[in-house]
Amino acid sequence: TQLLEQSPQFLSIQEGENLTVYCNSSSVFSSLQWYRQEPGEGPVLLVTVVTGGEVKKLKRLTFQFGDARKDSSLHITAAQPGDTGLYLCAGGTGANNLFFGTGTRLTVIP
Amino acid sequence: EAGVTQFPSHSVIEKGQTVTLRCDPISGHDNLYWYRRVMGKEIKFLLHFVKESKQDESGMPNNRFLAERTGGTYSTLKVQPAELEDSGVYFCASSTRLAGGVSLLISEQYFGPGTRLTVT
């Protein structure tokens, strides 16, 4: 079983602050996806990274895939209350299933 | 375009009863996946259909779980008989044809809202 550890598990910050969420594994993944999930809903795909060292930006969110394709980070600049939610990383090893991380619950306080 | 839908949204049953969950994938998506999150744990893969065929069912917990996808459209996941440890949120996801080169396959999966199953 490929285990993806996310840190921190919980994060509470003030509006306007920056934050970084980490997703680490000892396994190599062919792709790494980040999802955000809100209560009562399923995970919503934010981004997919596939190349070691790849960096993708989505407005205030910056995603990076580690050079060895074992880890990833999500950086949010100037967090807003609308960013509140559960952030999940998920590693893909091929055509089939995703291995999900343990999750980071972010709360942005107005 | 309609997203992945799941029915019911909640189900409360007694131990020993049978429950059937349904998933309607995004139209045209050949790949359909079932996942589950039990309390306090990460989301875990159960199985993967390509059209009507089971591609990978390595995550199915035991033979009390039966998944079908007749006709390659919607899928059902039946739990019979249900046990207390089956409680959790069951997610369905779908994806289109896999993209990428020969050595790299990417599955961008789109998730439904989940069915919360409570076994008492």
Image: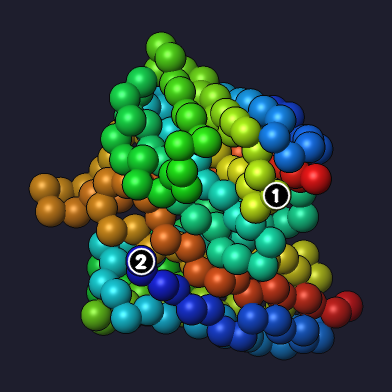
Q: Chain of mark 1?
A: B
Q: Read off the residue under disc 1.
A: B84
Color encoding of the figure:
rainbow
x 36%, y 69%: residue: A2
The amino acid at mark 2 is Thr
The amino acid at mark 1 is Leu
Whole-angstrom CA distance, mark 1 to mark 2, is 24 Å
Q: Read off the residue under disc 2.
A: A1
x 71%, y 83%: residue: A11
Query: Marks 1 and 2: CB-CB under 8 Å?
Result: no
Q: Is residue B3 above or below residue B74?
A: below
Q: Tell me: B87 left or right of B12.
A: left
Q: Where residue B85 appears, x then y in whole percent?
A: 65, 53
Indicate the secondary structure of the residue bearing disc 1: helix
Q: Where residue B90 appears, x then y in whole percent?
A: 61, 44
x 66%, y 44%: residue: B83
Q: Residues within 10 Å of mark 1 (few under 14, many from 20)?
A: some
**Residue A94 in sight here:** yes
Residue B74: give its label. Answer: none
Q: Chain of mark 2?
A: A
Q: Is residue B83 above or below residue B2?
A: below
Q: Nearer the viewer, residue B77 or A14?
A: B77
Counting the numbered discs, the total is 2
Q: Is residue A108 above or below residue B103?
A: below
Which quadrant: the N terminus of chain A?
bottom left
x 78%, y 37%: residue: B14
Query: Which quadrant holds residue B48?
Result: top left
